[in-house]
């Protein structure tokens, strides 16, 4: 495990020494503060639209950070040839995959905590309440979802040579699932065969990332989701992450790294 | 003396894009043995299979058939690399890390304790003369400094077997001397060194035994004296063994 | 024949100047979009209306605290907005049932997924209706010709948030952008009557609304008969409050001609006739 954590630590160092996170955080902060500064009908108690905009920006930023960071891990190591001195050490390819995953996931988690603290500060200054339970649930669920996404990206990065290809394809897939995942069954039922069958299979087989979007609960002050559901969703995320990581390892373990 | 490094009938084939030839044979039944405590030179012209052999030994490339082992452990097991150090020909390390962070990272991979890591890092930074630059990111280093970082990381775990891929390539004479000194010191400590090189003069000076490969096959193995017997020097023996035909004099 | 670089350059310069002279006359006649005084109009062109519609829908979503059908949900076909500017009418039970677009879970994924969705039909209340205002403001900025934005915004400002002055200001802004809008005039009358208790101003504004209504083409009058009914019924109530029962009856009779529920109006007419009979007869007011 210490090898995996050592690999993860290098990934985290890389993230906070690059500029991606800071640029996205500053952008999120500026847009949120700008949105919060607008005076609608001389009412300074209006807060939900600020929450909505801020949470949307956080979701987009976290997704970009996680996908871009994970997409370049293995390809960048191969291109920079740093993979060779690494694999010349007593570390297995499975440990490399898991270490990269853990590093990306922990780094994204740190970014999420920073984003949500900012969110809590801005919204709390307006509405004077801090529903920490709801915030914690929202952070946890988003982090769990990003585990699936990062594992998916790592799998893609084994097969696509360019990080840009992996990032683009993953963002399209994730965006599609988040927007349409809930409605795919309804869409399928409206289609003729064989499209209905295909879409139904996709609906049952795909990871349902839309479950992890608790923004509405935070924006509309709807309280917390039952903990049992959160626990099951966490297990679901762990299972999907495991599946993608295993597939990534299958692809990586026999790969000829010199070509 | 027991074999530290061994290959038996090692064969590696690559798929090619050439329609006339579906696969290319990089190594064809290589039988190699390196004994404990010796300095072993691995020679051959470009494309002979030296790098492929190293890639198999280090686990980068799976063999098509045959076996390869380090300290009696199949090279496909990560634990086989616990007691080795590797210096690649071209030094590529994480540019965003400092030399100290890089060494600390690799020490963790080897499972070294904190106190021993601190001690080894201090010793190695002194050995490669990078103490003053240890806290700067590697992207700010010159090529020579990066190669010295490479040498330091190859020694972080105090390896019993050092695998060096053209260790003096690109170094100035002082750098080459430093590398030779380090190899000599390791030999005196009872370590084994396995390296590939094109510098036959250096090979003659420091190697106990050499092997010459050509077109994926082992052509000769033995001490420098045994291989050079009947020739003026190792270079002439090498050229004869690899089948070099000199152009007729005008 | 070899052409020298210098003559090529001269030729290109001549062509460029010729094109510039010719195009300068043409660009002056391009559409007014580039000269728009509205930033959104300049940036987005007619696409701003799509955004305006989306933001108006967002106001509805906010009113229902996120419980809202998507474009894929069956019962959402008519895009019936709940945030209507009707005068205090609560949703019927049937409306409530129609809004239960989720239905039974289709499978275990849908069932489990409902733990993470808002599944309760609620409305904002206790002054939380303020949360829909930003979206209405944005919708109005993006599409000043969308009348519903002003009427809905004013309704909530007046009825739920008790800010008649801001409702009036919002409606007046809408009126500047849509001077012939009966709907805005109707709502403005509600502000004066219900908010400011100024019957005279309410009457004037509603009468103006009726005048504007009759300026519409006959086909459009048929389509917009509900707003006419709203105007005349409110005028009838106004006259009733003022004791002008005859005028009130006239207005209600005018409303009966277009109302989908003439029976209910007849009951009101009958009651007014009883009140009138109890008084000294007066000449009924003229119908404009």
Image (cartoon, rainbow, N blue to C red):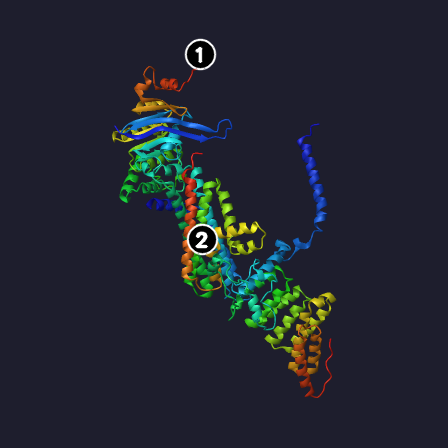
Q: Position of residue C11 (x, y in %)?
A: 70, 36
- Classify residue C59 as left or right of residue C217: left
Residue A250 shows in this picture: yes
The residue furthest top is: B250
Q: Whole-Å distance between the Cαs marked 2 and 1?
A: 74 Å
Q: How many marks?
A: 2
Q: Callout 2 environment at 10 Å: few (<14), some (14 to 19), or many (20+)?
A: many
Which numbered disc covers residue B37?
none
Image quarter of residue B140 = top left
Where does label 1 land, which residue? B249
Assess disc 1: are there few (<14), some (14-19) or many (≥20) residues with their C-alpha within 10 Å of its C-alpha.
few
Quadrant position of the C terminus of chain A in the picture: top left
Residue B30, horizontal then vertical, whole percent: 36, 26
SS of the residue under disc 2? helix
Of all chains, the one bearing label 1 is B
Q: Are marks 2 and 1 on the same chain?
A: no
The residue labelled by disc 2 is A145
Q: Is residue B182 visible?
A: no
Residue sitting at 66 percent across and 31 percent down? Answer: C5
On the rendered structure, is B192 left or right of C72?
left
């Amino acid at each position: 495990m210490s090898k995996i954590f050592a690999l993860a630590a290098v990934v985290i160092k890389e993230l906070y020494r690059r500029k991606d996170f800071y640029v996205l955080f500053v952008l999120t902060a500026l847009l949120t503060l700008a949105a919060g500064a607008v005076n609608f009908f001389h009412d300074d108690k209006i807060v939900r639209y600020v929450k909505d905009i801020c949470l949307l920006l956080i979701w987009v930023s976290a997704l970009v950070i996680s996908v871009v960071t994970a997409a370049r891990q293995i390809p960048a190591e191969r291109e920079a040839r740093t993979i060779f001195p690494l694999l010349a050490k007593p570390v297995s390819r499975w440990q490399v995959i898991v270490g990269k995953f853990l590093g990306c996931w922990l780094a994204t988690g740190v970014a999420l905590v920073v984003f949500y603290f900012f969110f809590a500060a801005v919204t709390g200054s307006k509405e004077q309440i801090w529903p920490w339970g709801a915030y914690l649930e929202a952070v946890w669920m988003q982090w769990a979802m990003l585990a699936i996404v990062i594992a998916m990206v790592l799998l893609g990065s084994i097969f696509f040579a360019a990080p840009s290809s992996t990032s683009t394809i993953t963002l399209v897939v994730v965006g599609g699932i988040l927007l349409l995942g809930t409605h795919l069954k309804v869409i399928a039922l409206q289609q003729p065969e064989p499209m209905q069958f295909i879409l139904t299979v996709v609906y049952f087989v795909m990871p349902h990332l839309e479950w992890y979007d608790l923004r509405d609960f935070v924006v509309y002050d709807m309280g917390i989701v039952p903990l049992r559901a959160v626990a099951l969703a966490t297990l679901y995320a762990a299972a999907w992450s495991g599946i993608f990581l295993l597939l990534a390892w299958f692809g990586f373990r026999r790969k000829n790294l010199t070509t | 003396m027991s074999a530290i490094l061994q290959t038996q009938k090692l064969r590696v084939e690559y798929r090619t894009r050439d329609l006339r030839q579906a696969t290319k044979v990089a190594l064809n039944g290589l039988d190699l043995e390196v004994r404990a405590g010796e300095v072993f030179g691995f020679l051959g012209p470009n494309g002979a299979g030296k790098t492929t052999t190293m890639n198999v030994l280090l686990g980068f490339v799976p063999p098509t058939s045959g076996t390869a082992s380090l300290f009696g452990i199949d090279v496909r097991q990560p634990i086989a690399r616990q007691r080795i150090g590797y210096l690649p020909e071209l030094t590529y390390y994480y540019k965003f890390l400092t030399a100290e962070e890089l060494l600390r990272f690799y020490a963790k991979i080897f499972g070294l304790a904190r106190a021993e890591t601190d001690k080894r890092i201090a010793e190695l930074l002194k050995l490669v003369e990078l103490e003053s630059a240890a806290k700067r990111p590697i992207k700010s280093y010159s090529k020579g400094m990066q190669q010295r970082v490479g040498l330091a990381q190859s020694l972080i775990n105090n390896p019993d077997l050092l695998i060096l891929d053209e260790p003096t390539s690109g170094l100035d004479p002082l750098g080459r001397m430093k590398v030779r000194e380090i190899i000599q010191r390791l030999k005196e400590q009872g370590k084994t060194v396995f390296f590939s090189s094109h510098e036959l003069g250096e090979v003659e000076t420091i190697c106990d035994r050499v092997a010459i490969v050509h077109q994926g096959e082992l052509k000769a193995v033995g001490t420098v004296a045994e291989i050079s017997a009947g020739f003026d020097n190792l270079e002439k023996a090498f050229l004869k063994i690899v089948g070099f035909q000199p152009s007729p004099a005008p | 024949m070899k052409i020298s670089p210098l003559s090529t350059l001269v030729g290109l310069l001549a062509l460029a100047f010729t094109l510039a002279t010719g195009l300068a006359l043409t660009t002056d006649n391009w559409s007014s979009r580039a000269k728009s005084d509205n930033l959104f109009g300049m940036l987005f062109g007619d696409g701003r209306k799509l955004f305006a519609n989306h933001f108006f829908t967002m106001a509805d979503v906010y009113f229902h605290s996120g419980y809202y059908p998507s474009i894929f949900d069956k019962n959402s076909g008519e895009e019936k907005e709940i945030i209507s500017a009707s005068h205090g009418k609560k949703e019927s039970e049937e409306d409530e049932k129609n809004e239960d677009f989720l239905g039974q879970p289709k499978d275990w994924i849908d069932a489990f997924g409902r733990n993470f969705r808002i599944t309760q039909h609620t409305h904002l209340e206790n002054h939380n209706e303020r949360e829909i205002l930003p979206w209405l403001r944005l919708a109005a900025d993006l599409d000043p010709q969308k009348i519903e934005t002003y009427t809905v915004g004013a309704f909530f400002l007046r009825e739920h948030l008790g800010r008649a002055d801001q409702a009036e200001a919002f409606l007046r802004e809408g009126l500047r952008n849509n001077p012939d809008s009966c709907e805005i005039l109707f709502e403005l009358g509600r502000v004066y009557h219900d908010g400011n208790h100024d019957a005279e101003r309410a009457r004037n504004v509603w009468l103006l609304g009726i005048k504007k209504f009759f300026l519409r083409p006959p086909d459009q009058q048929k389509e917009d008969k509900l707003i006419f009914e709203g105007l005349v019924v409110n005028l009838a109530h106004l006259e009733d409050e003022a004791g002008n029962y005859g005028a009130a009856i006239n207005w209600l009779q005018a409303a009966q001609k277009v109302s989908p529920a003439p029976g209910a109006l007849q009951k009101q007419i009958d009651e007014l006739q009883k009140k009138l009979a109890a008084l000294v007869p007066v000449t009924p007011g003229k119908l404009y």
